[in-house]
Image: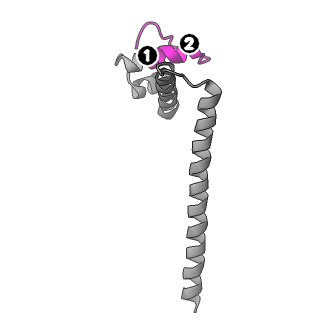
Amino acid sequence: MSKTMEDSIKRWTAKRKTALVIEIIQGKTTVSEASRSFDLTPSEIEGWVDDAKRGMENSLRANPLDIREQYEKQLRDLQEAYGEAMLELRARKKLQALLDAQDGN
């Protein structure tokens, strides 16, 4: 682990998260090493890496989206996925009720 990272970080500021993500991108550490070293979940660190990649991609666009637009798009995508999951769940419940009714006859 780099000397720039402190061993006992109490609060993960944006600056500290950025330093860790840069170390991961540069190959100086891995998500699993950082997870063990700083007692963080791999999914939390991977989320920071994903956020950083989205931010870099957006900043390099000819017409960058503002942060609100990014979050609104992400929210729409999540709502769409949630709606699809709910439809599938309802369909499975109806199918199960029909199968149970057939077994009962």
Residue under the image location 46 percent in, 21 percent down: 37
Give the residue type at disc 1.
Answer: Ile
Quadrant holding the C terminus: bottom right
Range of magenta residues: 1-22
**Residue identifier under label 2:** 15
**Residue identifier under label 1:** 22
Percent from the top left, x then y, of residue 5?
Answer: 48, 11
11 within the magenta span = yes
Percent from the top left, x then y, of residue 8?
Answer: 54, 14
* Label 1 Cα crowd, 10 Å radius (few <14 / some 14-19 / many 20+): some
Q: Using the image, tell me which numbered label, if any, was put on residue 92.
A: none
* Label 2 Cα crowd, 10 Å radius (few <14 / some 14-19 / many 20+): few
Rendered view: 4 above or below 61? above
Question: Do the residues bearing badges 2 and 1 touch, measured as CB atoms within 8 Å?
Answer: no
Residue under the image location 54 percent in, 87 percent down: 103
Q: For mark 1, give the secondary structure.
A: helix
Rendered view: 104 above or below 35? below
Give the residue type at disc 2.
Answer: Lys
Determine the CA span between mark 2 and mark 1. Answer: 11 Å
Percent from the top left, x then y, of residue 61?
Answer: 48, 22
Q: Relative to 93, is 1 on the left or the right?
A: left
Q: Is 49 or 34 nearer to us in this picture?
A: 49
Task: Write down the quadrant of residue 36 in the picture.
Answer: top left
Residue under the image location 39 percent in, 20 percent down: 25
The answer to whether any part of residue 55 appears in the image is: yes
